[in-house]
Image (cartoon, grey):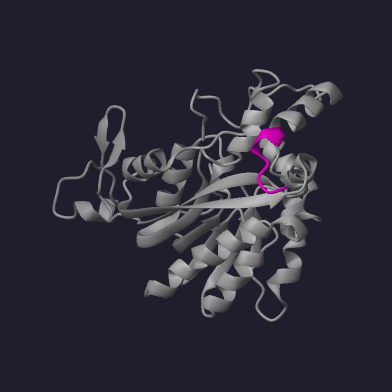
Amino acid sequence: MSGPDGAPFDSAHVRKAFGRAAASYEAHAVLQAEVELRLQERLDHLPLTPRQVLDVGCGTGRGTAQLRRRYGKAQVVAMDIALPMLQAARRHAGWLRPFARVAGDAQALPFADASFDLIYSNLCLQWSSDLAAVHDEFRRVLRPGGLLLFSTFGPETLGELRAAFSAVDDQPHVSRFLDLQTVGDGLLAAGFRDPVLERDVFTLTYAAALTLMHELRAIGATNADTARSRALTGKTRLRRAIEAYEAFRVEGRLPATYEVIYAQAFAPEPGQPRRTRGGDLASFPIERLRGSRRARTP
């Protein structure tokens, strides 16, 4: 996923940051837990009986465990790019019928075609460097008619922090995220059908800007923009950014805005075209060619 100017995210940085945050993640991921609850509530209204479920960007596996309880007869797989997160997920996996834990990248899923009936992902896809590739992979591993359900951050997220640092220099200090329209267009371009997108805006408040910054680091949500400065932010610049943030203080508290986008869509039937820059591209199993001429290998 690229920012507005096309600058992608640094996947290696994302992997390291979330790996370091595995031990502290759940203690600080209050917003992520709330969004997880709201995302899973959407499953209450969908008559699904999936056989295989994939949780992409499972983190510590808290949401995966909820999926496992919801779909007791399904095989549930937890996948994350950060191995320490998967190790932390062991305590949520249970012992009777534990869910599988797989290290992998959403842009190159380590699963066979048409492997899952449901792909679920909570606040993970905003860290992908190529969202189009992710959508293509989701379509590939979903069975026809399978459900894709995910949440991601929108561009209003951490707008106050971004503005505070912009008063200091022109370097990107806060990651940039795609808007609802772009996310929806991406689903359609990949061939998904019946997309439904919604958004929430949350405002968390803090006594000090440093508290917010420490919390972001504790959950691994650090700046992953490839255009970021590799040098540490100096004390003078940090102090100036903190001073600039004070302009947003209301009733003694500093706000931090988070825009959350929810999306659901269904995998198409075989043969439905996928939009490409060169036009529409259709694909279907060779079994669909029965009755037509096939080339024979001599």
Q: Nearer the viewer, residue 222 or 68?
A: 222
Where residue 114 appears, x then y in whole percent? Answer: 41, 58
Which residue ends up furthest to the top in the rendered image?
170
Which residue ends up furthest to the front in the rendered image?
251
Residue 256 included in the magenta stretch of the image = no
290 versus 71 height, above or below: above
179 versus 164 height, above or below: below
Left or right of 263? Residue 283 is left
251 versus 209 height, above or below: below
Say if residue 223 shows up in the picture.
no
In the rendered image, which quarter contains the C terminus?
top left
Left or right of 148? Residue 102 is right
Q: Nearer the viewer, residue 277 or 255?
A: 255
Q: Quadrant of residue 16?
A: top right
- Residue at point 55%, 42% (across, down): 126
Left or right of 182? Residue 290 is left
Q: Nearer the viewer, residue 247 or 210?
A: 247
- Residue at point 69%, 81% (across, down): 96
Where residue 297 appears, x then y in whole percent? Answer: 29, 41
Residue 251 included in the magenta stretch of the image = yes
Where residue 67 appears, x then y in whole percent? Answer: 56, 71
Task: Give the magenta range.
Answer: 245-252
Where residue 171 appears, x then y in whole percent? Answer: 66, 20
Say if residue 60 shows up in the picture.
yes
- Residue at point 50%, 63% (across, down): 39
152 versus 149 height, above or below: above
Left or right of 102? Residue 111 is left
